[in-house]
Image (cartoon, helix red, strand yellow):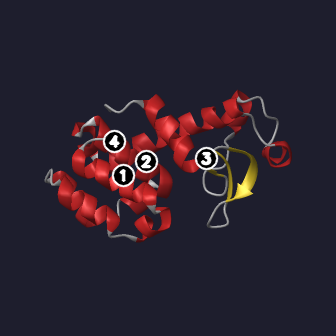
Amino acid sequence: MKYNRNTFLQKLVEHEGMVLQVYKDSLGIDTIGVGRNLQDRGISKEELDELDIPTIDHVYEYGITEADAMALAENDVQIVENELLVAHPCVDRLDAVRQLVLMDMAFNMGVPRLCKFKKMWAAIHDNNFTVASKEMLDSRWASQVKSRSTKLAHAMYSGEMQ
C-alpha cells in the first residue's frame, strides 16, 4: 500500500476522536480509543498483555492511555488494510490518496459494509473516480458522516486531499 500510515492515523484521530474512557458511540456501541468497537472487536488477550492491562474490566473501570489508544488503532489499521486488500485487491494499485479514502471508509463502517457499495467499486475498477465519488455521496453513510463524506468524495474525485 502506498498511503502513509502515520498520516492516516492522524486523520483517524481527527475524524474519530480519541476517547480514553469507554463510551457509547452514535449507535450505542461500547467504544474506546480511536473508534475501537468493544462489542465487535473487543480487546484481545494478546493486546491486553501487550498494553499491560490485566482485564477488559480494568479498561471499563479505568480507561486507557493515549499510547494504548494509538497501539489499538495501529492494530485496527492493519486488520482493516488486510481485510480491504482481500476483498478488493485493486486497492493496492490505486494512488496513495484514494487508498487513504478507502481505508478511512473501511475503518469507519467496516469492510463488509463498504463492499456493499457495488456501483462505487465498479467505477473504481474502471478508474472512473468521478462516478466513484458520486456513488460515495449517494449513500446512507454520507448522510451519517456529513462533511467527512464530502471531503473523502472530493479526494476520490481529484486524487488530492484537502
Q: Amino acid at mark 3?
A: Gly
State which quadrant residue 89 falls in.
Answer: top left
Q: Amino acid at mark 1?
A: Leu
The numbered dot on residue 129 is none
Q: Is there any visible trace of residue 122 in the rendered image? A: no
The numbered dot on residue 17 is 3
Residue 15 pos. (x, y %): 52, 48
> Which residue, given by chain and number where applicable, does mark 1 sit on?
152
Q: Is there any visible trace of residue 156 in the rendered image? A: yes
Residue 70 pos. (x, y %): 61, 34
Secondary structure under the numbered disc 4 in the rendered image? loop
Secondary structure under the numbered disc 1 in the rendered image? helix
Q: Residue at x 48, y 61 (%)?
A: 145
Label 4 crowd (10 A; few <14 / some 14-19 / many >=20)? some
The numbered dot on residue 161 is 4
The numbered dot on residue 104 is 2
The mark nearer the N terminus, 4 or 3, is: 3
The mark nearer the N terminus, 1 or 4, is: 1
Q: Is residue 72 above or below residue 126?
A: above
Horizontal side of residue 59 vs 139, given as left or right: right
**Looking at the image, is mark 1 or mark 2 nearer the viewer?**
1
Disc 1 and disc 2 in contact, CB within 8 angstroms: yes
The mark nearer the N terminus, 2 or 4, is: 2
Q: Residue at x 54, y 44 (%)?
A: 14
Tell me the quarter of the image containing the C terminus: top left
